[in-house]
Amino acid sequence: MRSSRRRNAFTLIEVLIVVVIMAVLAATIIPQFSSSSKDAKQSALKFDVHTLRSQIELYKVHHLGSLPTVQNNSLPQLVQYTNASGGTSATSDAAHPYGPYINGELPRNPFDGQNRVVSVSLGGVAPTAVADAAGGWQYDPATGHIWPNNAEYFGAGGEGSADFLK
């Protein structure tokens, strides 16, 4: 006689099959998440550079072709109110009707968290390497162009090319 007992647990084979399926899924999904952090930083970098460049152009239009200047590792004419000659003021008044072009402070470079600005070493030429290890942004006061100042941008991946930030 055979007794019919009802089993209440999974067999070892069933558990192993589930573990193998989960391992295969993890092997295909985890690499996608590890590169998403760098992708997010690159997207933020592109957005920040586009924003900075457009606000510099707007400043140039309002100030009859003049460009903001680097002062104390910043571009104060973008974050403060300005007059027609580029003089800055913390408050808006009749003498300072323009700006601020960026509220608060300049955006931080997402790769290094810095928002300091340094002038490029050779005006009129796009930089091909970091200006210094302190990070932030490189700015050309002669042309108004701005670039990231971090090794990841100029790294072996070729991100430092003109196509990366378009």
Image: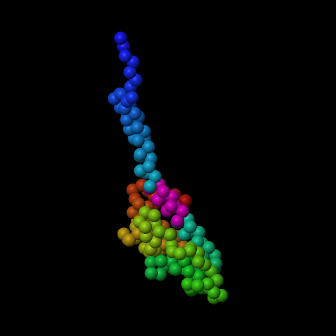
Please identify the residue farthest to the top as the structure is shown: 1
Residue 108 vs 64, above or below: the answer is: above
> Whole-percent x and y of residue 32?
44, 47
Residues rendered magenta in the picture: 38-48
> Whole-percent x and y of residue 48?
52, 65
Residue 93 horizontal side relative to residue 161, left or right? right
39 drawn magenta: yes
Please identify the residue farthest to the right as the structure is shown: 94
Residue 122 horizontal side relative to residue 102, left or right? left
121 drawn magenta: no
Residue 6 vs 73, above or below: the answer is: above
Q: Which residue is drawn at 47% across and 68% down?
A: 108
Q: Nearer the viewer, residue 76 or 120?
A: 76
* Quadrant including the N terminus: top left
Q: Quadrant location of residue 110?
A: bottom left
* Quadrant including the C terminus: bottom right
Q: Residue at x 64, y 78 (%)?
A: 62
Q: Residue at x 51, y 77 (%)?
A: 75
Q: Main secondary structure of the magenta part?
A: helix
